[in-house]
Image: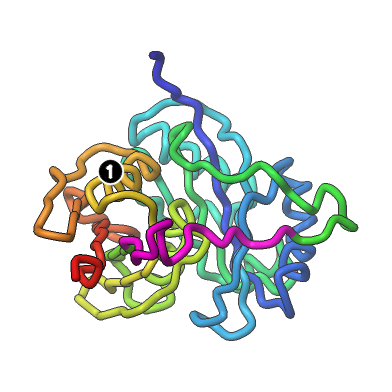
Amino acid sequence: MSENTELELLITVVVSAEDERAARDACRGLVRRLDGRIVESGDCSDEEPGCWSVTISRPGDASGTGPGALSRAVRTFLRELGPDYGRHRVSCEPPTAWTVVDNPELVGDLVTGGERMLVEAWTGGFAAFDSFDPLDDPDEPMPEPDPGPSELDEHGRRRPRLALLVDVVTERRAGAEWPARALASRLSRNAVIVDWAERPPMVRVELDLGPAIGEPPEIVTNAIAQLGGSGWSRLRVDGPRAMARWSAAPTPPSGIAAIELSAAADTANAD
């Protein structure tokens, strides 16, 4: 099987808006400018009241799998937006490179109500989203959110739950929650932040990704496959819990430094 070296850019904008439709409408101009498509949107009001995130996808202008190609794709995109964007630091850990533009004046020039923007370059196949974009037809109703697996299986037993820990090098909680959400969105549409802790120079964000189908080792293995990338630890199984971890080496000056995926069965099912 040949390796897919095409790069995909994901541009996630946090927008102050009344609702999801208004947030997506605010991004119309940027979508057209980028010749991209909206692939994800969601409520992030528990991070900042009245905020919504909108993620736009478009092909990268280059191909490759190494740090140079990934970082170059992000820098090239930033230069397209203007000289003030090109000054932002780009972090890289294959299969992704990223930067955060945390400047409401700059982002507000692109999107009405825009607060900040996360730009990611991913090696093809690592960032998979639904292709449906209701902005192609403004009169098309918003799709119902995917409810995901039910809490109980066909035998009435509670399904295992998938959890995600993300360590982000940042000085602020909001600076950690946002990239953690972006990562969680690749695994679940129902991610909920359940805890966070400052661990200078990092902030740790803990998310519950909801019930998942299968046994814990299978669930974690499938989640790793969805996120992609190399450098994951060996799957560790401890009774009803399975866990695997990824960490950047060396620790980047900003951005995601470590990820932990875990799934645990409900021990009450054994009673």
Q: Is residue 34 above or below residue 103?
A: above
- Residue 99 image offset from top left, x and y in percent: 45, 55
The amino acid at mark 1 is Thr
Q: Position of residue 238 (x, y in %)?
A: 9, 58
Query: Which residue is rendered at x = 27% and y = 45% of the image?
Result: 218
| Quarter of the rendering occupied by the N terminus | top left
| Magenta residues, start to end | 143-160
Task: Give neighbour class at mark 1: few <14, some 14-19, many 20+ (Cα, 10 Å).
Answer: some
On whether residue 148 falls in the magenta region, the answer is yes
Residue beneath the point at 48% across and 32% down? 124
Describe residue 262's horizontal placement relative to residue 137 as left or right: left
- Per the image, label 1 sits on a secondary structure element best described as helix
Q: Which quadrant is the C terminus positioned in?
A: bottom left
Depth check: give the residue in front, 124 or 69: 124
Does the segment drawn in magenta span residue 59? no
The residue under the point 34% across, 66% down is: 158
> Eyeballing the image, is 211 above or below 83?
below
**In this rendering, is residue 110 above or below 250?**
below
Q: Residue furthest bottom?
A: 49
Q: Is residue 180 visible?
A: no
The answer to which image quadrant residue 55 occupies is: bottom right
Q: Main secondary structure of the magenta part?
A: loop
Position of residue 21 in the picture relative to residue 94 (left or right) = right
**In the rendered image, the vertical position of residue 144 relative to residue 33, given as above or below:** below
Q: Is residue 94 visible?
A: yes
For label 1, the residue is 221
